[in-house]
Image: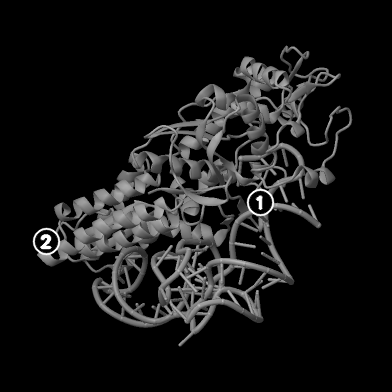
Amino acid sequence: MLKIYNTLTRKTEEFQTLEPGKVKMYVCGVTVYNDAHVGHAMSAIVFDIIRRYLEYRGYDVKHVMNYTDVDDKIINRANQLGEDPLKLSQRYIEDYSRDLANLNVIPATSNPQVSKTMPLIIKFIEGLIQKGHAYAAANGDVYFRVTSDDDYGRLSGRKLEDMQAGARIEVGEQKEHPMDFALWKAAKPGEIFWESPWGRGRPGWHIECSAMNLAELGEQIDIHGGGNDLIFPHHENEIAQTESYTGREFSRYWIHNGMLQLGGEKMSKSLGNIISIKEFLSQHSSDVMRMLVLNGTYRAPLMFNDETLAAAERNVERLKSALKPASSSASGLNADSLSALSAAIESAGTNFTEAMDNDFNTAGAVAALFELSKFINTARDNGATADQLKSAQDTFKQLAGVLGLKLEEKKGSSEDEAQVEALIAERTEARKQKNWKRSDEIRDQLKAMGVTIEDSKDGTTWKWS
RNA sequence: GGCGUCGUGGCCAAGUGGUAAGGCAAGGGUCUGCAAAACCCUCAUUCACGGGUUCAAAUCCCGUCGACGCCUCCA
């Protein structure tokens, strides 16, 4: 039985879907005006793993991830570059979806955009005004009336009275209550705008997600996800808007990932302590980024530093070792060893599922993989044939795949490979003649080319490192 | 100041009432011409601190200290 920690109730609850066998999941995507960083990668990977696991458990998952392509920061950046804001955001949407593909994140079922949801957003706001949950100010802004929502603050555990102290009203805002938030912002001169019943303007941040959610998944969804920095005000406001509009419970489960930490602080665009996804992937494989996430708890802060990175790197190599082929001189395992291996396959599957069922405990799931890899490697060392290893390696690959790990060896160009093969042939000849000096020279030369070699009874194998 | 999450070996981290998973690092060993990889062994009588509940607590309760996130845009 799958259990999920629900931010809304602050409890780990049994997962029950609105419709049997189907999951409707909405995850907040990014605001597209800049290169995405590894913190965004963490969030994307967390929900990718959740999706993969739900599918592994047999659910049909509708996964929606939006793009915020209308926003102050986009407008500012576009002005700086002298570019059309929608063109700029489109460029970054394509860029980010490439990043995600490079991270082996399965594309969402759909990726709605604010700029393409405008009629529904306006209709949504009109509905809120009609029901008394929103009001238009004289300057053309429209605000949500927080006092019209008895439950306001229930996701973040805040009370309206407590929030007022810190609240502030920007110059020019005409709110009834300091915590009222903008649904529609009147356009300033020179800004991109859409026509609306309240004049030219653009939507506020929170209403976008409520509207795209409604458009893509309907009034009620199973899972709403995002980074825990979005709990307040973004998700709080989404709940207020949607539930005020539909009169029904919005999302059954709220899942939030923790923040990736660099140097003891959250990695963020505003702090500037950023490592972009592209930068990361130019140095490491996508599996390493994923392993970093898998080693931790998705809800907790993720430590990103040289040590955790090195550990992730080693972990990936270790898992890959389980997929190495049987020795060509393998003589076969005896019956006892074979049954030990099949017992290991079974318990790996059980332990994996048990861990993942417990609020996506990926660290435990990875531990199950490590245990299976140890059995596979021992079996290989003891002379298991390819046939005898097959079902263990198949299970291993399948479970690793549920976590989104590729465990592929790096590839080089075919010319380079030919050169490597030639050098290895020369080295093998040198070793036959016990010319260790030449042999080691070649090994160093290969290392400089980025090739790691391993000698065994069956000959020399190599890989790009 | 308010709200929330959390504090487990050098590091990352699981476990949330029955006596500390897993990985990295480190040390020793098998294998190897030497390596590398793999495998084996060692590595927390103890879970921030102080009280309490219980036959039994890292796990529950109270208090203290500390960290991080949010309260403004943020995955």
* x and y percentages locating residue A413 in the rendered image: 37, 40
Relative to A206, is A137 above or below? above
* x and y percentages locating residue A9 in the rendered image: 57, 47
Circle 1 sits on which residue?
A: A266
For this view, does A349 lie left or right of residue A339?
right
Q: Secondary structure at mark 1?
A: strand
> Is any part of residue A272 visible from this angle?
no
Q: Residues within 10 Å of mark 1 (few under 14, many from 20)?
A: many
* x and y percentages locating residue A130 in the rendered image: 71, 18
| Badge 2 or badge 1: first in the primary sequence | 1
The disc labelled 1 sits on which kind of residue?
Lys
Residue A135, picture quadrant: top right
Instruction: Please tell me the numbered disc located at residue A6.
Output: none
Number of labels in the image equals 2
Q: Secondary structure at mark 2?
A: loop
Q: Residues within 10 Å of mark 2 (few under 14, many from 20)?
A: some
Q: Are marks 2 and 1 in contact (CB under 8 Å)?
A: no
Foreground: disc 2 or disc 1:
1
Circle 2 sits on which residue?
A: A332
Which residue is more in the foreground, A456 or A363? A363
The structure residue drawn at horizontal position 65% and vertical position 28%, both measured from the top left corner, is A244
Relative to A463, is A65 above or below? above
- Mark 2–mark 1 Cα distance, whole angstroms, equals 52 Å
The structure residue drawn at horizontal position 20% and vertical position 65%, both measured from the top left corner, is A432
Relative to A144, is A3 above or below? below
The disc labelled 2 sits on which kind of residue?
Gly
Residue A207, picture quadrant: top right
